[in-house]
Image: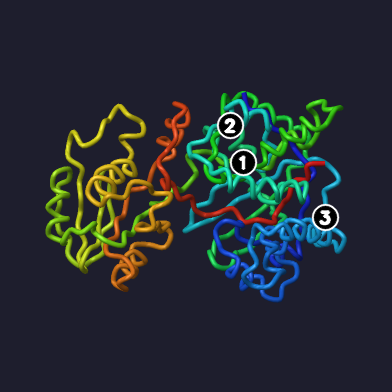
Amino acid sequence: MAKIKPFKGVRPPKDLVEKIESRPYDVLNSDEARAEAGDNEMSLYHIIKPEIDFAPGTSEYDPRVYVKAAENFDKFQRNGWLVQDLEEHYYIYAQTMNGKTQYGLVVGAYVNDYLNGVIKKHELTRRDKEEDRMKHVRATNANMEPVFFAYPDNNVLDSLIMRYAATAPVYDFIAPIDGFRHQFWIISDMADITAITEEFAKMPCLYIADGHHRSAAAALVGAEKAQQNPGHTGNEEYNYFMAVCFQASQLTILDYNRVVKDLNGLTTEEFLEALKEYFYVESKGMESYKPSCLHEFSIYLDGEWYSLKAKAGSYDETDPIGVLDVDISSRLILDHILGIKDLRSDKRIDFVGGLRGLEELKRRVDSGEMRMAMALYPVSMKQIMDIADNGMIMPPKATWFEPKLRSGLVIHKLA
């Protein structure tokens, strides 16, 4: 069963939150972070992407960068830009996108739950990316950014959250860049804290929605600290890492689309003919066409959109992985026809999050940068949970969650 705890969050004063909050470290590069931070010395990018404090071109993996992260975290606290709560709390974090609001509980998730599989994952992680985040956690001795969890719908927690949502939030702002609304409440009532802990203790598992590398790094550093502490009791703060947990039914998963540089030596006509072995192919003309259901794809090629509907027998309904559209398209189009074997490393393919729309796919093809674009129907949260429950791993680049969690609303210290 899932074990969580409240914690003494490190947070910005209300009047500074919009100066400090930022996008997550992994959705922008160093130059973009440098530009967004500008002359704002309070931007969290100085902690989560501290290479911006060095000359342009400095590697984000330079050892000095991790030292600077710790120095800047200390500076933010000394200056009162980040202040630690005196008592342990849970927190509520709400995000509103396109009129839809999702409410998350910010908790301390248990390291051993990650190590023992109570916290379930659906993606592979890369050791180099894990090690980068581990160095950052070690240097700052904190979880600077939360990971993104899902939990099965729970009426008790939903009622509790809605009670707080009817009150004035501590933070309430529209973020730049994404234009989404972000709200934040503090849960300090002991009866409510107990109720949340007890409800999670009834859950057989939690699911990582987004942030697999941060989850792995946080858990591995916690386990590392336990091994290094001869007086370890299991009650230390490093036994927990920060997560925002959302009810599964509230989450929005967008399509994660593909653009390809060439047709593997085929002409347009030969490529379309090859597709007909596995798909019913229909021209949709010049108007952008979005897949409307599972097992339907759309491609953009030579100024024209096409619908592809997978034929019976081209996938196995009983296989939780094989039935995924991301697997069908990878096997039958990218691999079999286009010769793209490894989505993680092949330079002939790139990926476009659904928030950018079909126009971004069209733009990249029309510009001549790419030869063909392919749009997929989004994966469902049920599919993700089924795969995680079966101990399986989804193909790469399968899910795109929006809105992204803003960083800097609350931080979890490991001591």
* Label 2 neighbour load within 10 Å: few <14, some 14-19, many 20+: many
Tell me where residue 117 sits by quadrant. Answer: top right
Q: Which amino acid does the dot numbered 1 rest on?
A: Ser
Of residue 299 and residue 371, the one placed in the foreground of this image is 371
Quadrant assignment for the N terminus: top right
> Where is residue 58 shown, x and y percent of the image?
65, 67
Could you tell me if residue 189 is visible in this image? yes
> Where is residue 102 shown, x and y percent of the image?
54, 48
Give the residue displayed 71% in from the left and 60% down from the top. Answer: 65
- Residue that carries the numbered disc 1 in the rendered image: 215
Give the residue displayed 28% in from the left and 46% down from the top. Answer: 335
* Label 1 neighbour load within 10 Å: few <14, some 14-19, many 20+: many
Give the residue displayed 22% in from the left and 49% down from the top. Answer: 337
> Where is residue 371 shown, x and y percent of the image?
27, 64
> Where is residue 404 shown, x and y percent of the image?
55, 54
- Decide if residue 334 is on the left or right side of residue 172: left
- Residue that carries the numbered disc 2 in the rendered image: 119
Image height of 150 relative to 256, above or below: above
